[in-house]
Amino acid sequence: MANGMEENVVDGSTMFSDEEVREISGFKSGGDDYVEVTCGCTSHRYGDAVGTLRVFTSGDLEICCECTPGCQEDKLTPAAFEKHSGRETSRKWKNNIWVIVDGEKVPLSKTALLKYYNQALSNGSNRSQAGRVCHRDEFLKCTQCNKHRRFRLRTKEECRTYHDAFINANWKCSDMPYDKITCDDDEERASRRVYRGCLRSPTCRGCTSCVCFGCGTCRFSDCGCQTCIDFTMNAKA
C-alpha cells in the first residue's frame, strides 16, 4: 500500500473486516482506495447535518455534505464539516461527528473508521490531516471565462497538475486533465472557496500549517521553471 502504512495492497473492499463495520448504516466500498459511510454532526440550534464520509486507505477523510437538498459543500475535511454544521463546540470532530451503528449515533472516535487516519498520523504520512506543513487547495482563474477553479494538492500528481497550470499564462477551464470542466460550468461559491484544507482552521487564509514554500512533492526536477530549478539546485547543495 502507498505511504508505507502496510506492505500489503489494500483496496476499498478489504479495508475493514465484517466485524469492524457490522451494523454501520450506509457503509459500502466506494472505489479502489476508499469506503463510504453515512455520517452526521448535531447542532443544538440547527439539528442534524447529514453527509457521506469517505475513508481513504491513505488516511485522508472527506465528507460530502447533504444537510439540505441544494447544499454543494463537498470534499470537506471533518473539521470543516463540523464547522459547516453549526456545531457549537467545534474543534472536537472525532467526538462530534457520528455514524449510525445499530440504530444509535456513535462518535467516529469509538469506531474502527479512523484506523487508517490514525496509522497515517503515527507514520507521519498524512501531513495535511496531522496539522503539519501541507499543501492547501489553490485556485486559478480561467483566461477565457475569468472563473476561479479549485486545485487540490494532496499528492505529487495533483501538485504537478496545479504547477503546470500556474505557469501556463493562457490556462483555461478545458485544460483541467481530470475534472471535466468547461467555461459553462458554474464557479464555486465564494462561501465555499474559503475552505482550503487547513486542519488548524477551516477558513485559514494561510499559515505555517498549510502553506508550503517548496518541497519534493510540489517541486519537480524535470520542470524548466526557475522556481523548480532553484529548488533542485539547493536540494543538491
Image: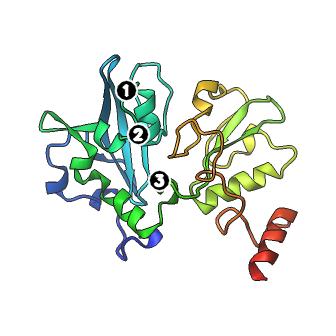
Rendered image: mark on residue 91 = 2
> Where's residue 75, x and y in %?
49, 40
Q: Is residue 11 visible?
A: no
Rendered image: mark on residue 216 = none
> Where's residue 231, x and y in %?
78, 70
Q: Distance between the residues labelled 1 and 3?
A: 22 Å
Q: For this view, does 168 lie left or right of residue 202?
A: right
Choose top left, top right, bottom left or bottom right for residue 218.
bottom right
Q: Which amino acid does label 1 sit on?
A: Glu
Question: Badge 1: how crowded within 10 Å, few (<14), some, or many (20+)?
Answer: some
Q: For this view, does 222 lie left or right of residue 91?
A: right
Q: Is residue 152 visible?
A: yes
Rendered image: mark on residue 88 = 1
Q: Contact, CB < 8 Å: mark 2 with mark 3?
A: no
At 67% across and 27% down in the image, what residue appears? 187
Residue hosting label 3: 129
Badge 1 marks a residue whose secondary structure is loop
Q: Nearer the viewer, residue 127 or 8?
A: 127
At 65% across and 39% down in the image, what residue appears? 205
Residue lying furthest bottom in this view?
237
Q: What residue type is labelled 2?
A: Arg
Badge 2 marks a residue whose secondary structure is loop
Badge 3 marks a residue whose secondary structure is helix
Q: Which of 121 and 88 is in front in this view?
A: 88
Q: What colouring does the structure picture have?
A: rainbow
Q: How far apart are marks 1 and 2 (CA)?
A: 10 Å
At 69% across and 54% down in the image, what residue appears? 161
> Where's residue 128, x and y in %?
52, 54
Residue 190 sits above or below residue 6 on the image: above
Residue 89 sits above or below residue 123 on the image: above
